[in-house]
Amino acid sequence: MHALDVLGDPVRRRILELLTGGETSAGEIAAQIHDEFGISQPAVSQHLRVLREQGFASVRPEGTRRLYALAPEGPTAAREWLSAFDQFWLPKLAALDTELARGRRQRRLGTADSTTTTNQEQHHD
């Protein structure tokens, strides 16, 4: 299975989001996913298995609990695959960043100009 196939499923993406907060028990993950998606614990277990097998999550036993954590391999594979397309969107994102910075600067200058004008008007009264 390709890394992007793993990320294509909204339940798996949500599980990964939950794991960004640190180790999480399978029970906590299942409860949260059930509340949000209405799927059963066995279905959540299947998603966790896919995430484990594809290198997106790791698991360690702690007594009767299974604690899941993010694993770097899956996201790295997805990032590497996507990097082939950087040439298409990075220049556009850089241009967008420049325009956003220009807009922020103009708003700051516009705010400063209007404040200066207001202060000057008050002193002339």
Image (spheres, helix red, strand yellow):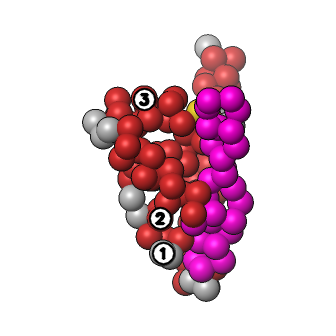
Mark before the other along the chain sequence, 2 or 1: 1
- Residue, x 44% and y 35% (percent of image)? 30
Q: Is residue 44 above or below residue 28?
A: below
Residue type pointed to by label 3: Ala
Please report the bounds of the magenta region as a residue range.
54-82
The percent position of residue 85, horizontal first and vertical second, equals 57, 83
Residue corresponding to mark 3: 31
Q: Is residue 22 visible?
A: yes
Mark before the other along the chain sequence, 1 or 3: 1
Q: Is residue 114 visible?
A: no
Q: How many marks?
A: 3
Residue corresponding to mark 1: 1
- Residue, x 49% and y 70% (percent of image)? 4
Q: Residues within 10 Å of mark 2 (few under 14, many from 20)?
A: many
Q: Nearer the viewer, residue 105 or 41?
A: 41
Q: Nearer the viewer, residue 124 or 84?
A: 84
Of circles 2 and 1, the one toward us is: 1
Q: What element does badge 2 sit on?
A: helix
